Image (cartoon, helix red, strand yellow):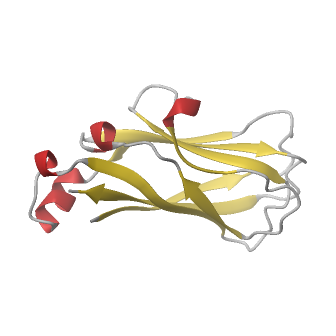
């Protein structure tokens, strides 16, 4: 079954430097695991893995993300900073592509130990090849696939 986590919103301000890696963090997000287990009439012992399935970042003001080089979405326990090993979704080699909606690729990591708990932390890390040209309002949606 699919576990949806929609509507994380954030703003990329104009003038961000390509020499930094701006990170947007959402801490103590609810996993809603009890709801998903109830809806699918199962429990965590019947689930062998919770794998990244799909994710996208959308420009709400229809501005192209052509200044980006890479995006990494990381999921980790709340209260700590995520690292590269916590990557759930990513996309690289984006230089000069005029996306207004970015479809991210899922990693191969099993997030069952983390998403079987109550809360988690999400970090969206941007690596840029140019300064952000304007302020961009963004929406991030992701989903995971629980496998029995």
* Depth order, front residue of 108/145: 108
Residue 74: % across, % down: 53, 41
7 to 132, vertically: above or below: below
Name the quarter where the C terminus is drawn. bottom left
Closest to the observer: 102 or 105? 105
Question: What residue lies at 32% left-to-right and 38% top-to-bottom?
Answer: 114
Q: Is residue 82 left or right of residue 41?
A: right
Left or right? Give the position of 81 relative to 111: right
Tell whether 117 sits left or right of 130.
left
Q: Residue furthest bottom?
A: 62
Q: In the rendered image of this protein, does residue 99 appear above or below residue 79? A: below
Q: Residue at x 74, y 36 (%)?
A: 21
Q: Quadrant of residue 5?
A: bottom left
Relative height, residue 79 to residue 53 (above, below) = above
Query: What percent of the width, then of the height, locates residue 44?
Result: 15, 47
Q: Could you say where residue 133 lies in the image, as x and y percent from the top left?
A: 88, 57
| Residue 121 visible to an observer of this rendering | yes
Q: Position of residue 41 (x, y in %)?
A: 9, 64
Query: Would residue 27 be seen by someone viewing this image from the given angle?
Result: no
Is 126 above or below relative to 37?
A: above
- Residue occupying the point 53% across, 61% down: 55
Q: Nearer the viewer, residue 7 or 84?
A: 84
* The N terminus, quarter of image: bottom left
Q: Residue at x 86, y 55 (%)?
A: 95
Q: Quadrant of residue 22?
A: top right
């Amino acid at each position: 079954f699919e576990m949806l986590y929609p509507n994380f919103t954030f703003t990329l301000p104009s003038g961000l430097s390509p020499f930094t890696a701006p990170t947007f963090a959402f801490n103590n997000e609810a996993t809603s695991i009890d709801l998903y287990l109830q809806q699918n009439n199962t429990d965590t012992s019947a689930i062998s893995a919770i794998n990244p399935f799909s994710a996208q970042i959308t420009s709400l003001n229809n501005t192209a993300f052509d200044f980006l080089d890479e995006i990494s979405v990381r999921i980790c326990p709340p209260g700590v900073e995520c690292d590269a090993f916590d990557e759930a979704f990513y996309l690289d080699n984006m230089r000069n592509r005029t996306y207004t909606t970015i479809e991210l690729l899922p990693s191969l990591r099993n997030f069952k130990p983390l998403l079987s708990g109550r809360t988690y932390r999400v970090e969206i890390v941007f690596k840029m090849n140019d300064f952000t040209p304007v302020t961009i309002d963004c929406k991030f949606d992701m989903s995971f696939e629980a496998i029995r």
